[in-house]
Amino acid sequence: MTLASPPLPRKILMIAPTSFFSDYGGHIRILEETLALQALGNHIIISTYYMGRNLPGLDIRRTAPLPYHTDYEVGSSRHKIAFDAYLFFSALRIALRERPAIIHGHMHEGALIGAVISKFLRIPLVFDFQGSLTGEMLDHGFLRPHGKLQWLMWHIERFINHQPQSILTSSSQAHTLLHDEFGVPPERLHALPDCVDMRRFDPALSTAEAKQALRAQLGIPATRPLIVYLGLLTDYQGIPHLLQAAAHLKASGREAHFLIMGFPSVPHYQALADGLWVGYCFTLPGKIPYDDAPLWLAMGDVAVSAKVSATEGSGKLLNYMALGLPIVAYDTPVHREYLGEYGEYIPPHDIVGMAEALWALCTDEPRRRERGRQLRQRVENTFTWPRAAAQIDALYGRLLAEKRHRTNHV
């Protein structure tokens, strides 16, 4: 009797138009999705730019290097047109060779590249929507509000949004935007908020001795309450608001310390802090490796998010929540989706309110502990990657079943 061979892993081609892996934002979603989907038996092939960090256990296929502009910053850039052209041909070669069952495009460029390959090879396309393309370009200052270029980009974005068979949205607000503003049929939309690896972001793993040693190494005074942030250092993430909040506290004779981790533009924000005479209240260590993030964050008494985007996810909140950190955040639909009733909310752009809320939490240890406990419990109940990966895997299965049905009835 011959035993049947086990089924081969289902191949998924992920198209990531970025320098994967870097230690921030959307890269974390791509990484954790990949690890969780691989745990379910899928073979994930990540097609990405030629720069970035390789990680063990991941099948990362990179483009050839461009002959110019070998170093570039994150975010919108006119050079991305060339990067994406290289990525298209690289992803197409991979698809022709590997014949994946599903194409999974991240961000709008990945969805557009995936759409062309999807139609050419008749492979279902899933779009991992992490925020409005037009909205991001406005946030970065690449578009003038209500200008002709914004009109053009909106129509390009609308075209891309209608190509995939299914779209995963990182927030319910994005789900609403795609349906109401861009007219995407609701049956194509699947809300899949960012999640967190509870084993990695476990407060029990960071000992008091390790936190004290790191704090001393960074020169952070032991007597000051510590406010933490980890993410991109950009104006649209609200970093200037944190500087101004520190200035407000200093002016009233109250001093907290801010550990603002991330990149780029560290010298720029350090100069702004010095200009407000609060440079000594800020530590900006730059990029923190993802594996080190739990310890660095666990040093904090309070976490903060001053982001005001209405459509982009804010996955960094989940890392704070998993570590049991209380959180002060601007009152936006995306923040409320993550934090529920357990966030300390401030009206957007209310810098004085932000400062006062941060100080109130810093000086109220029982409230901090209770909020942190409630937030960690909320993550454990709702925002874990195994649960999200099961949803994605089931979606892959439905798309492939629909494809087989169409093929059988041609």
Image: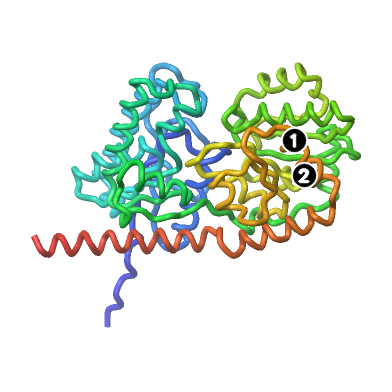
Nearer to the camera, 106 or 3: 106
Locate the C terminus by quadrant: bottom left
> Mark 1 — residue?
259
Check disc 2: other Cα within 10 Å, few if <14, some if 14-19, many if 20+. Answer: many
Residue at 83% of width from left, 39% of height from top? Answer: 215
Determine which quarter of the picture holds residue 8: bottom left
> Mark 2 — residue?
300
Residue at 27% of width from left, 78% of height from top? Answer: 2
The kind of residue on which mark 1 rests is Leu
Check disc 1: other Cα within 10 Å, few if <14, some if 14-19, many if 20+. Answer: many
Image spot of residue 350 (x, y percent): 67, 34
Image spot of residue 260 (x, y percent): 70, 33
The kind of residue on which mark 2 rests is Gly
Left/right of residue 255 with respect to residue 293 in the rendered view: right
Labels 2 & 1 near each other (Cβ < 8 A): yes
> Upstream in the sequence, badge 2 or badge 1?
1
2 versus 250 height, above or below: below
Image spot of residue 113 (x, y percent): 30, 37
372 versus 73 height, above or below: below
**Element at label 1:** strand
Residue at 39% of width from left, 55% of height from top? Answer: 190
Determine which quarter of the picture holds residue 378: bottom right
Image spot of residue 238 (x, y percent): 63, 32
